Amino acid sequence: MPSGQYDFVVVANRLPVDQVGTEPDGSPRYETSPGGLVTAMAPIMAAHDGAWVGWPGAPGEVGEAFDADGIHLVPVPLSTTEVADYYEGMSNGTLWPLFHDVIAAPEYHRHWWDSYVAVNQRFADAAAAQAAEGATVWVQDYQLLLVPARLREQRPDLKIGFFNHIPFPGYEIFSQLPWRRQVVEGVLGADLVGFQRRSDATNFLRACRRAAEAVTKGGTVQVDDATGRREVRAAAFPISIDAQAFEDLATSPEVVARAEQIRKELGEPDTVLLGVDRLDYTKGIRHRLSTFAELLEDGTLDKESTVLVQVASPSRERVQAYSDLRDEVELTVGRLNGDHGTVGFSPVHYLHQSFPREEMAALYLAADVMLVTALRDGMNLVAKEYVAARHDGDGVLVLSEFAGAADELTQAVLINPHDIDGSKAAIVRAARMPADERRRRMRAMRRRVKEHDVERWAQDFLGTLAGEPREPQGQQ
Ligand code: F6P
C-alpha cells in the first residue's frame, strides 16, 4: 500500500470535532469538541506532521479531509446501520458493559460483531492511507480493538501504539466474549499497549495467555505473525488532564464570581455536595442518590442546609440500558425531592445537560465535597478536574476505589460505593473534615495532578513506544 504523508496519526472513534448539520452548499458543518485527548495531542500534532482519523459523530456521508488548528482531520463515515451495530451495539452494548465488570448485561450478536469488524477495517485502511513511511500511529480505545493488527497487516513499517481508556476485565469475565481470541490478536498488532491501571495490564496479559495461547514474560507478550516474531509490551499509563489550563480557568475572576453566585442561588447551604458524570450505569449515580437519601432520612445530614448538585450529561441515549437508567435516576430524584424538599427548597438539583468548561470549573469551586462513586471506571477525569480547579486548596474528594484515579489520588476519602453504610460515613466525614486536614489532603492531590498531567501522559506513552527508558512512576 502506498504510504501517506503524516508522521504521527491518531486513530479514535471520534474526531475532535462534531458534525452539526450541513452548510448551504450541502457540505458537512463541524464544531470543535475540545476533549482531553485533543489537548494532549495538539502540541505533538503541531510539532510533527499530525493527522487524526475518526468519525464526526453523525451517520451518513462525510466531507473531504480538512485542516483545523494545525491538525489534518480525516473523517470516517458510518452508515445509520453501522451506528446501530458497531457503535451502539458492539461497542456500547457488548464491550462497554463487559469491560466494566458486567454491571449491565452485555449482549452478544453476530451481526454487531460483523459490523465492528468492517468498521475497524475501515479505520485501519484510513490510517494506513495517511501514515508516512515509518510513522507512529496511536490507536485509541475499545471501539477500535482490531485496528492495530489490521493496520500492521498492510503497513509493517509503522510503529503502532494502542491505549485502552476503559478497564480491562479479569479473564473470568472477558472469556464470555465469543470473539475473545480475535480481540486479543487485534490488540496485539500494536508494539505497545497502554492501560489505566496495572491491574488492567495484568488482566490483559492473562487474556493473551488464555485466549490467544501467547507466551508472556513480565509485561511483554511474544507474538508470531506474518511479519515474524515481535515483542508487544503492555503497561499502565494513567491518563490525566491539562491541569494548568483547568487551574487557570478556575482562577479567572468570572469563574470565581460564578462560583459565589452558584452558592447564593442554592440558598447559601452549609454543605454543597457535587456529582458530575455522563449519565452512565458505571458511574454509581443510583448508589450515590440512595446514600444521600439515607443521610437525609436518618437526619445525619441536615435537610435544610445540605444540597446535592448532580450534573448528568446526556449520553448514548439510544442504548436501552441508558434510557432505563435515566428513567430510574429521574424517578429517584423526584422521590427524594418529594420526600425531603420544602416549598422553595429541593435537596437535589438534577441537571440533565452538558455545560461549558467555565460552568464546570465554577461548580467545582462551589462544591465542598465532590462525589465520585463509580462502580467501575477506567480513570475518572472529573476527580482530577475537581482537584485541579481547587486553587484555593480547599474541598474534599470522596472517591470510589473502583475508579482508576484511586491509584493516584490516595489522599481522597476512598469508598466502596456498594457499601452504603461505609459511603454514608465517608460523606459525613468529608462534610465535617477540619480545614487543616482538608488542605493537607488537597495539597498532596494537587501536586500529583499537576506533575502528572496529560502532556506527561502522552510523552510517557510515545517515548516508551519510541524505545526510550521510562521514568519511575511514583505512587500508583
Ligand atoms: O473513555 C470512554 C469513552 O467511550 C471515550 O472513548 C469517549 O470519548 C467517551 O467515553 C464518551 O463516549 P461516547 O463517544 O460514546 O459519547
Image (spheres, grey):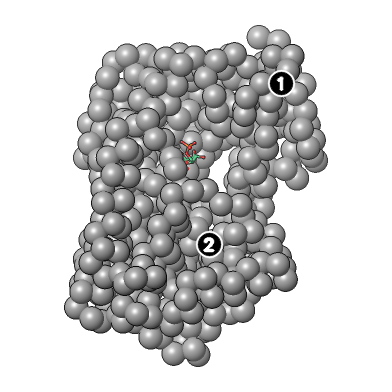
Q: Is residue 450 above or below residue 20?
A: below
x, y percentage for residue 343?
Answer: 34, 70
Q: Residues within 10 Å of mark 1 (few under 14, many from 20)?
A: few
Q: Is residue 8 left or right of residue 165?
A: right
Where does label 2 land, which residue? 384
Where does label 1 land, which residue? 23
At x 59% / y 72%, what residue is drawn? 261
At x 31% / y 72%, what residue is drawn? 342
Say whether mark 2 is within 8 Å of ligand 1.
no
Counting the numbered discs, the total is: 2
Q: Is residue 440 above or below residue 148?
A: below
Q: Amino acid at mark 2?
A: Lys
Q: SS class of the residue under badge 2? A: helix
Eye-nearest disc, 2 or 1: 1
Q: Where is residue 453, by image quadrant?
A: bottom right
Q: Nearer the viewer, residue 298 or 470?
A: 298
Query: Counting residues from the N terminus, which is met first, the one under dot 2 or under dot 1?
Result: 1
At x 52% / y 48%, what residue is drawn? 354
Q: Is residue 33 left or right of residue 7?
A: left
Q: Is residue 276 left or right of residue 429?
A: right
Q: Where is residue 97, by image quadrant?
A: top left
Measure the alpha-carbon separation of dots 2 and 1. Answer: 38 Å
Instruction: Tell me, yes or no, if residue 200 can be seen here.
Output: no
x, y percentage for residue 213?
Answer: 31, 28
Q: SS class of the residue under badge 1? A: loop
Q: Amino acid at mark 1?
A: Glu
x, y percentage for residue 47?
Answer: 80, 40
